[in-house]
Structures are given as C-alpha cells and as structure tokens.
Image: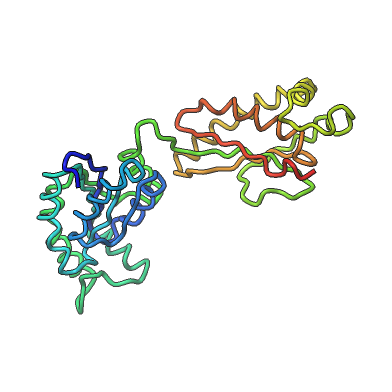
Amino acid sequence: MSEDKPTGEVLIVTGMSGAGRSTAANALEDLGWYVVDNLPPQMLRPLMQLTQFAGSTLPKIAAVVDVRGRDLFAELPAVTQSLRDSGRVRVLFLDASDDVLVRRFESVRRPHPLQGDGTIVDGIRRERAMLAPIRESADVVVDTSSSNVHQLSMRTVELFADENAARHTITIMSFGFKYGLPPDADLVADMRFLPNPYWDPSLRALTGQDPLVREFVLAQPGATEFLEAYAVALRPVIEGYQRENKRHSVIAIGCTGGKHRSVVSVGELAERLENVPGVAVRVKHRDLGRE
C-alpha cells in the first residue's frame, strides 16, 4: 500500500452508555458518513486503511466504540493515540449526568452493560472510571443531560456537517389526483383552481415541461400570485423543519392527471426555493407519462 496516499476522516464516537451514541450515529449517517457500530478498538486501524483503498467513495467513517466491547475496549486509548499519529482521527465523547443516565436506563427498562449483579448506579460508576482517560483526550465532548434526541441530532449536524452541506432536502412532486394522494407527502397543494390545458386540443398531447403549456398555465389569473405566495409561506415551515432536525420533506402539487398544471407549478416552485440557505431541492413528476 502506498504510504503517501491520504486517508479519509475517521471519527470515533464513544462515551457513556445512555448518553446518545445511537442518536449521534444516526445523525452522522444522515450526513453521509459511513457508520460502523460496536466496533472493537483493534479494528480501527484496518478501518482507516479501508479509507485509503476506497478513496473518495468512502471519505468519512464514524466508528461507534463503547464498553459493549468488554475487555477489548480497554485498548481504546492506546489505539486512538497510535491512530492520531498516522492519520485524521477525531474523538466525539458523549456524556450526561449520573441521575439523567439512571432515568434513561429506567425508562427503557434495560440494565447497564457494566452493572453485573449490582445496580444501574454501580454500572455507571464503573463505566465513568473506565472512560475517564478517553474523555480527557477527546476532541469534542457533548453533554446531553438537557438535550432530547432532536437537539442532539442538531448538535451533531452543527459539529460535523460539511460547511456547504444541505441541512434539509425538499422533494417537490407533481401528481394526479385521479391516481391518489402521495402517501409520503408532508404538504399538498391543489392546482385545479386553474383552467385545464387538457381541454385545449393544441395542448392536450403536450406536458407541463413544454414551453407552450408553461406559458398557458402561468398566464392564468392567480397562477403566478399563488406560486409566489406559496414559496414565501413555505420558508418559515422549512426553517422549522431544520430546527426540528427533520431532514427530508415532500411537497406535493397536484392537478387532475399530473400532466400539465402540476408539472409547471413544480418547476416554478423549485426555482423559487432553490436558493433557500441549507436546503437542497429535488423535482419529481410521479404521474407524468401515465396518460
């Protein structure tokens, strides 16, 4: 293997049981990281080498390493220090107060992995002593005592998302009401208040992607006014989705057959939303071609 080939970034996610490792891992996965759960520390070096082989196809890896590894976990400090000397490695340590951890374990009715024949508190104390040197050397420590899962997810995104990465993806979908509502739609708009190009013989065979149909639809009273007002009304909704860490949403726009009015409207709305900060816009025409 070439020694000068750069490795991708590896983030070690560790910390107290019940502090939110799974939530952070899910948020990283949503950001495009390749997440490996419950990895023995001894496997971290082969994982880093994998990033060399994969190149740009696997640029970032997050490995969740914790006390479930039992005796193997004891080697994490030494392995981490060795990897720091040879590549791009960071450690995210998730923590929470003892009383919060106790409440979380009691709420899910599961034992602490280190409590053995003792109590949850005994397990927490053993784990905290074992993790003390790792916490001390961690690159990022996040206390989740007062955070819910959505807040922790947002904090993870703030810390580890690429600078220009979209925080929310919107799919704007055209559809035909006669084929049924899209079951995954978050918001639905109805364009049947506009005259139907279907009844114009010169436009019937065309679709909303044709300039003649677009011109016809947008020339109708209320069409442009509605699209502009709808785009403005959607902005606070999108901002709210971002605050609540809702990373994907579907805006469905319908007409009778999903061929003319809705297709034009989807394209127009996409143009009006494509420059919203932190948002990626996708366009989908569900029923185009069914007629």
Residue 152 visible? no
Relative height, residue 205 to residue 96 (above, below): above
- Residue farthest to the bottom, as pictured: 117
Which residue is more in the foreground, 247 or 103? Answer: 247
- For the point 38% across and 48% down, which residue is it? 27
Q: How many marks?
A: 0
Left or right for 20, reference 73: right
Q: Give percent across and percent down for residue 23.
A: 36, 53
Relative height, residue 281 to residue 53 (above, below): above
Quarter the C terminus occupies: top right
Q: Quadrant of residue 274?
A: top right
Which residue is more in the foreground, 160 or 50? Answer: 50
Residue 198 visible? yes
Left or right for 80, reference 8: left
- For the point 25% across and 45% down, which residue is it? 52
Q: Quadrant of residue 20?
A: bottom left
- For the point 47% across and 43% down, which residue is it? 247
Looking at the picture, the colour scheme in use is rainbow
Relative height, residue 161 to residue 11 (above, below): above
Q: Give percent across and percent down for residue 231.
A: 61, 28
Q: Quadrant of residue 251?
A: top right
Q: Give percent across and percent down for residue 202.
A: 87, 27
Which residue is more in the foreground, 246 or 174? Answer: 174
- Residue farthest to the front, as pictured: 1
Q: Give percent across and percent down for residue 190.
A: 74, 37
